[in-house]
Amino acid sequence: MAEIVLAERRQKQAGRKGTARRVTLTAAMPAARFVLRAPEPSLEPLSHALGLMLPREPKKSASSDNRRRHALWLGPDEWLLIDADGADLGAIGTGTGALHSAVDVSHRNVAILVDGPGASACLNAGCPQDLSLDAFPVGACSRTVLGKIEVVLLRTGETAFRVEVWRSFSDYAWDFLEEAARDA
């Protein structure tokens, strides 16, 4: 009888770190990620279940009190939910009676943390969005491009960003950011 062996998923970019004079790149720890779609009447019960208020405006995000769970506004009825503790966010809204769809995309994305006084300049090497603190304050988020790929940016501090990227593009994103960090 054949032995069944399950494949082990390895975190893409795990343990990777890069530093330049003004920028540090770090592969973020694994996290649970869900794409949430919901109409306006469902937002209140879903927010309550998630433990944070789902943002309702472009470029806005919300975080739980312990800053381990985030909801990033991606569109009028779409959010990217990130939970650093790996919680099953898809099950959280089940008992609310709220109409919604929650799709687990944890396997699809990885995150690269970009930090330091040159972080905005590093990202702007391939991102056309104005990332100045006035235009993109702490907590701002956006689905945008970096070079030739789609990413989701979250500003986590005055000089810190979380770059969510599809794992199949993560090598490209890392190499791009590493090169840009040298010039920032």
Image (cartoon, rainbow, N blue to C red):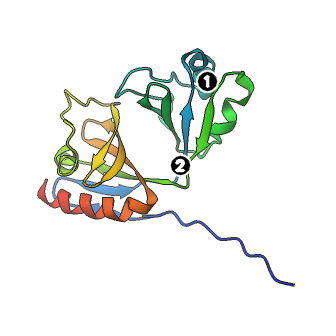
Q: Residue at x 55, y 50 (%)?
A: 106
- Asked if residue 67 is positioned above or below residue 29 in the image, the reply reads above
Quadrant in which the N terminus appears: bottom right
Q: Residue at x 21, y 51 (%)?
A: 126
Q: Secondary structure at mark 1?
A: helix
Left or right of 138? Residue 89 is: right
Q: Residues within 10 Å of mark 2 (few under 14, many from 20)?
A: many
Q: Residue at x 78, y 76 (%)?
A: 4
Percent across and percent down for residue 116 are: 23, 47
Towards the viewer: 89 or 16? 89
Q: Residues within 10 Å of mark 1 (few under 14, many from 20)?
A: many
Residue bearing the label numbered 1: 46
- Asked if residue 154 is positioned above or below residue 184 in the image, the reply reads above
Left or right of 63? Residue 134 is: left
Q: Which mark is residue 18?
A: none
Q: Residue at x 38, y 65 (%)?
A: 16
**Which quarter of the picture shows residue 131?**
top left
Residue bearing the label numbered 2: 31
Towards the viewer: 65 or 56? 56
Left or right of 46? Residue 174 is: left
